[in-house]
Amino acid sequence: MKKLQILDGRYGEILRYLIIGGLTTVVSLGVYWICVSTFLDPHSALKLQAANVISWIAAVTFAFFTNRTYVFRSRGKNIAKEAWRFYISRLSTLAADMLIMFVLVTLMHWNDKIAKLIVQVVVTILNYLFSKFLVFRDHS
């Protein structure tokens, strides 16, 4: 038990972020797969991006509340300011997500689900850095 406390003290934020990031990834992939399995054809560039955007909205909303509460343990009184910074930072990684998906799936003809998994790893790392240094930096 003492080892877990030491581990939480040193690496707690990163571990919590990885757990929440994993759950956020599940939300994103789940919503994406539901979209392309039911009403959006991933072979159409426009519908592929629509599925990507829908999955992004669901994942970012989940991520804001869980990151604020469990990862960065923000006590900031200005939730709207944090939310604004969070969504703006996520919009930048959405742009990266969409660009990489377009290149891998539309131009290079990769399997869309494999491409999406790769993109999620890149986006998760970028999102942590933005959250840590831009969004929840005040911790007050």
Image: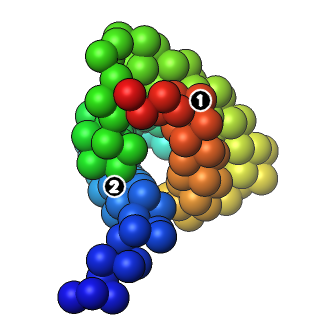
Q: What's the CA distance linking mark 2 and mark 1?
A: 18 Å
**Closer to us: 67 or 55:** 67
**Residue on which disc 1 sits:** 134
Q: Residue at x 34, y 34 (%)?
A: 74
Q: Residue at x 27, y 87 (%)?
A: 2
| Amino acid type at image mark 1 | Leu
Q: Quadrant of residue 20?
A: bottom left
Numbered tag placed on residue 20 in the rendering: 2
Q: Residue at x 38, y 79 (%)?
A: 6
**Callout 1 environment at 10 Å: few (<14), some (14 to 19), or many (20+)?**
some
Secondary structure beneath label 1: helix
Q: Residue at x 42, y 20 (%)?
A: 82
Q: Earlier in the sequence, mark 2 or mark 1?
A: 2
Q: Is residue 78 above or below residue 4?
A: above
Residue 57 visible in rendering: no
Secondary structure beneath label 2: helix
Q: Quadrant of residue 94?
A: top right
